[in-house]
């Protein structure tokens, strides 16, 4: 058995490579060697879940959503929720929200997942975030609120969603 573990350990990609483009079976094999590997931070600041979200690796992202220690996974590269919103990935956004991810964490620019969803003009994700109590009044470091971004998009459906939920 130890020879098998040795062989597997030396023939596999890193958790970060697997998060980008690997499979759930590869993640499970890495976890069999070190269960905490899925919580590691890459030198560039990415967490495996965030990488999976940014790279559209849904199979791995959905697995990690249920296994990482910190579902919010805030790093200098943002959160998994921000990454899923950036990729317009409604399925992963729903999975993260179902795990009670915090939709109000801001990145280094003070930008939240809601701001990114609005900038992407993704009405479905904007609604999901608002339904998850995303703060529509929160302003980024430039002083722009979600409604300000909504007005910039000139998307009346998004503007109406934001106005209806403005505090």
Image (cartoon, helix red, strand yellow):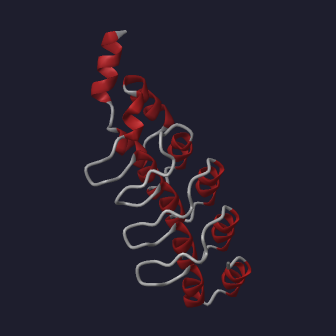
Q: Residue at x 69, y 87 (%)?
A: 156
Q: Residue at x 48, y 44 (%)?
A: 70
For the C terminus, which image quadrant?
Answer: bottom right
For the N terminus, which image quadrant?
Answer: top left
What is the residue that sits farthest to the front in this orientation?
167
Q: Would you place residue 112 above or below residue 32 in this image?
A: below
Q: Nearer the viewer, residue 135 or 121?
A: 135
Q: How many marks?
A: 0
Q: Would you place residue 45 above or below residue 155 in this image?
A: above
Q: Would you place residue 159 above or below residue 21 in this image?
A: below
Q: Nearer the viewer, residue 41 or 2?
A: 41
Q: Position of residue 161 (x, y in %)?
A: 71, 78
Answer left or right for 48 relative to 164. Answer: left
Answer left or right for 9 relative to 63. Answer: left
Q: Residue at x 59, y 78 (%)?
A: 137
Q: Quadrant of residue 138?
A: bottom right
Answer left or right for 53 relative to 4. Answer: right
Q: Position of residue 25 (x, y in %)?
A: 48, 31
Q: Quadrant of residue 145?
A: bottom right
Q: Quadrant of residue 122?
A: bottom right
Q: Position of residue 64 (x, y in %)?
A: 51, 41
Q: Residue at x 31, y 54 (%)?
A: 45
Q: Would you place residue 116 above or below residue 81 in this image?
A: below
């Amino acid at each position: 058995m130890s020879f098998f573990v040795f062989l597997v350990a030396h023939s596999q990609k890193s958790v970060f490579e697997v998060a980008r483009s690997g499979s759930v079976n590869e993640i499970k094999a890495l976890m069999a060697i070190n269960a905490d590997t899925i919580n590691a931070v890459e030198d560039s600041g990415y967490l495996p879940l965030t990488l999976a979200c940014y790279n559209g690796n849904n199979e791995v992202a959905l697995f990690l959503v249920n296994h990482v220690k910190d579902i919010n996974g805030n790093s200098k590269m943002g959160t998994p929720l921000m990454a899923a919103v950036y990729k317009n990935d409604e399925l992963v956004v729903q999975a993260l929200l179902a795990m009670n991810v915090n939709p109000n964490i801001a990145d280094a620019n003070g930008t939240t997942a809601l701001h990114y969803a609005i900038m992407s003009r993704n009405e479905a994700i904007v609604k999901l975030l608002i339904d998850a109590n995303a703060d529509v009044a929160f302003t980024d470091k430039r002083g722009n609120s979600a409604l300000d971004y909504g007005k910039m998009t000139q998307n009346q459906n998004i503007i109406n969603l934001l106005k209806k939920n403005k505090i």
